[in-house]
Amino acid sequence: MPKRLDRLLVPFAVATLSLLGGCDKKDNESSTSPKAEVAGAPQLQNETYDCNALENDNPLKRSWCQAKKLFDLNNSNLGANALAEYVRGFRLGIDDARQARASSVDRQKPESQTESLQNQGYRAGYESVITQMGITEFNCESDSEPASEYREHWCEAAKSFRMSNTGDDKNPFLRARYINGYMAGGRVALTVPASMESFLNNETPEGKQPPINTPKADTPSTELIFYKGFNAGYKAMVATIRESINQVMEQMKSSNDSDDPDDPDDSDDSDDSDNPDNPDNPDNPDNPNNPDNPYNPDNPYNPDNPNNPDNPDNPDNSYNPDEQGST
């Protein structure tokens, strides 16, 4: 935990315990002790600050003023005791959120029942941290949200997180870490393969970097969730690409089979006027209408053509016996 956050949480925790009656500290404790710094703070029931000037070194004042601002929106007429209850819940919500815990109350405000001020304050504090951290969330069961490619992939990653049993599905911080890893893994999967063969055979191309380095043994659990999401997203994208490639290859194979010239059922030359084997092609040697076909009746070189000068039956042929006799 960062040192600065540690300094903030210690006095806050002590102040919370003092409300429960667990911190009866003496006034003469050393001023350097973190507990002594909070011992002089007002009890929560009577806690009040001037919110016009916020000191960065007083986390109790900052959280009190943040809570009071939200409290006054709907509950300003309930008095100081109600405010104290709301502030206490607000601080507990902030504390849980900063430690990446799941919310201890329903994150959606109940509509059909009344709710304690502490729970209202808790939800407000918890959600304020989520907003400040810029965590993106979608309601994948709702049809009222605008559709987008990112939302579709986000919901896919959220479903993967829920099925992975990696963490509490209601924990937005762990889920966000997993989804970030899932998205990154899918993006990297598009850049790793060096050849179609290595990709289809699930091989790591020679000389290529690994998709991601193996985490160290002492890697915090919240960081390990990112790695788990990365591996899930990487594998999901690889499977999707393989499926797409296989579909394209099947389509190409089907197309080639339908155009196979060796397939007797697939050839139809009857309408191919340029095919020399087409009987209607005038260039077909066997076509009787081919002027070069010696059996074409109109071919002057057809032996049976009476106009063939070489035909002995041709009256004009000097070798026609009848012609010779007449001379």
Image: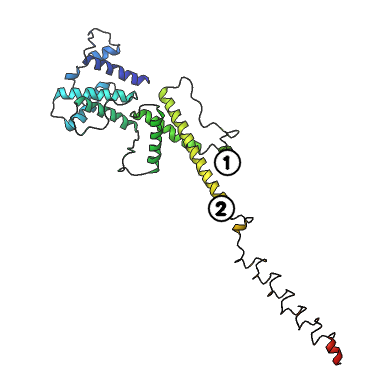
317 lies left or right of 240: right
Residue type at numbered disc 2: Ser
- The quadrant where residue 317 appears: bottom right
Residue plotted at (83% across, 88% down): 322
Query: Which image quadrant for residue 174?
Result: top left
Up/down of 208 relative to 47, above or below: below
Frontmost residue, 303 versus 156: 303
**Residue 123 x %, y %:** 25, 28
The kind of secondary structure element at disc 2 is helix
Alpha carbon separation for disc pair 2 and 1? 21 Å
**Residue 211, percent across and down?**
52, 32
Image x and y of residue 14, in percent? 27, 15
Q: Specify which label sits upstream in the sequence, 2 or 1.
A: 1
Instruction: Identify the residue at horizontal 34%, vertical 28% (top origin).
Output: 171
Of the numbered discs in the image, which one, if any, rests on residue 255? 2
Tag 1: amino acid = Met
Q: Which residue sits at x=41%, y=23%? A: 221
